[in-house]
Amino acid sequence: NCRIYGLSYTGNFTAGVGMDVTMAMFSDDCFDLSDNYILTVRDMPDGGNVTTAGGETMIVTAPGDGVSDVIEFAHTTASTSAYRYVVTDEAGIILGLPPANMVDFEDAGEGTCLVWGLSYTGNITAQIGDDATMVPLTDDCFELSADFVTVVRAIPDGDMITTGGGQVALSVIIDGNTDVIDFVNTSTSAAAYAYIVTDEANVVLAAPFTSSFDFETLGPITSRVWGISYTGELTVQEGDDATAADLSTGGFDLSTNFVEVIGSLSTGLNERTSVDFTLWPVPTSEVLNVRTSDGSAIQAARILDLQGRVVAERSVYDAEVLSIDVQAIGAGTYVIDLRTTSGQARLRFVKR
């Protein structure tokens, strides 16, 4: 930076380079410096780096949904020159020269654009339609940023989903072993995609997950898996009505179908081993008695509700007959999970 003063004087000019302007004798007679000065800033433009105000270098918006898509941009530069932002397509053709650091992409339609920073002196001469990488952008010095922010304008489309094997309905056995199922979708939107699990009333049970989920964790219920295409950040939470709640801070679209997953407890006598056993009385209201039919000794028994929760259990030492007090549990259908010296099995029973 430098300062330019005016000097009025008579006689001969006597000042020289290097003197202190506030102390120097500028002539051998009378003189007077101007009361003000012109500040001249000598600066080399530096485009630096650009991000969104939140530090992102790529962001997805949903145009045309009636919600403004205002994005605020920020930059870092070593220069004190003027700074503007330049919006181009992916080929570098200028689409816009916003006057401020915020742009609303709501009416821009689908597509991808790049937002550059421009450090410059002089006047901007670039116009919409110019190639920002080829033409002079000002009538003096300028430099584009070293990078850009990619703005993907995508309309979310949930389209359809299936399992990785192409199924839209299947069953799993809730038996303590993992039941991981993979999902795929047919959406062609550039928006992000995730999956959510709901019950049959579309109340969210688990969300969100990427492309696979372990249904062993849900217990023996019938659930629905939906796909969701979205922009912004997902806000969906357990307990939301997936068909009524706002699931994202941006736009979103649920899949047009769901995959039904039926979780069932093992119910047969010989589903996990050859162990066979007898229960009495059935139905029962006070005590449930258990005896193995193959002579194997009972070591432990658990009673589970149909959500897979343990409501009663007993451990014994090689008993031939086991009695379990069930008075404290409510009426309904339960499962007894029995472990013996020969193996393990499960069977349903009714508590009155």
Image (cartoon, rainbow, N blue to C red):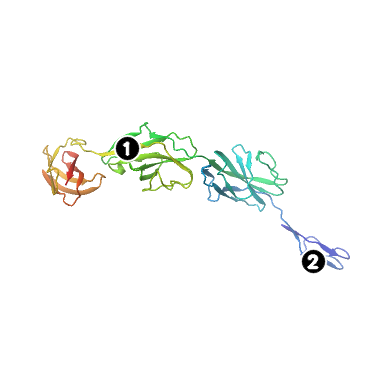
Q: Which amino acid type corresponds to the residue marked 2 in the rendered image? A: Ala
Q: Which amino acid type corresponds to the residue marked 1 in the rendered image? A: Val
> Badge 1 local density, few (<14 within 10 Å), some, or many (20+)?
many
Residue 68 % position (x, y): 54, 47
Residue 168 visible within the image: yes
Dot label at residue 261: 1
Q: Could you say which quadrant of the image residue 41 lies in?
A: bottom right
Residue 4 % position (x, y): 77, 59
Q: Quadrant of the N terminus?
A: bottom right
Residue 7 % position (x, y): 82, 63
For marks 2 and 1 on the same chain, the one whose residue lies earlier in the sequence? 2
Residue 15 visible within the image: no
Dot label at residue 149: none
Residue sitting nearer the eye, 66 or 79: 66
Report the residue marked by disc 2. 24
Report the side of 139 relative to 8 (left or right): left
Mark 2: which secondary structure? loop
Residue sitting nearer the eye, 151 or 35: 151
Report the side of 301 relative to 96 (left or right): left
Residue at (37% x, 39% y) in the render: 225
Residue 200 % position (x, y): 33, 41
